[in-house]
Image: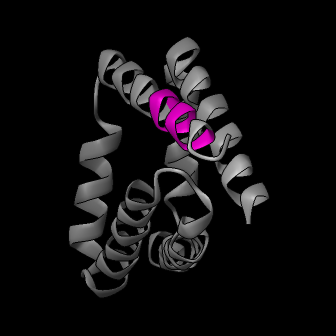
Amino acid sequence: MKPFLLFISIFWTAFGIRAILAPLKLKTLYTKLIKPAKGLFILPLIFGVLFLWVSPVSRLEAFIKVLGIISLIKGLFILVCPVNVLRSTFDYFIGGSERIWRVYGVFMLLLGIVTGWSIL
């Protein structure tokens, strides 16, 4: 169970550093990833269940449970939303400035650090 949280922590930390250092490259990666928008619903659902499953292992159990619930809500949102609403949401997110992407990177970096700290 702890390896999952460790993997997520390392991934979010690396992702945050990448977003801070090269936000435009990350923006182009996101534009490529959202082509199959409706098919992406399964990933947040799986990660939501995994977060809820591993939450007893962490020192911040409530925090990990909240991450799991948010992930489940995100997966259900992607599943039930019409494609045009989903596309407009993704376009709004991708249309952000370089500064917004860096703030997003700082948020992801902090999320990775807190998640990693919760299992130490």
| Quadrant of the image containing the C terminus | top right
Residue displayed at 47% across by 77% down: 41
Identify which residue, 65 or 8, lies in the foreground.
65
Residue 88 falls left or right of residue 56:
left
Residue 113 falls left or right of residue 77:
right
Task: Determine which quarter of the picture holds residue 94.
Answer: top left
- Can residue 18 be found in the magenta stretch? no
- Can residue 114 be found in the magenta stretch? yes
Identify which residue, 51 or 60, lies in the foreground.
60
Residue 92 locus on image (x, y percent)? 24, 45
The number of discs equals 0
Task: Determine which quarter of the picture holds residue 79.
Answer: bottom left
Q: Over which residues does the magenta segment extend?
A: 109-116
Residue displayed at 41% across by 66% down: 65
54 versus 19 height, above or below: below
Residue displayed at 28% across by 30% down: 96
| Quadrant of the image containing the N terminus | bottom right
Residue 74 locus on image (x, y percent)? 35, 69
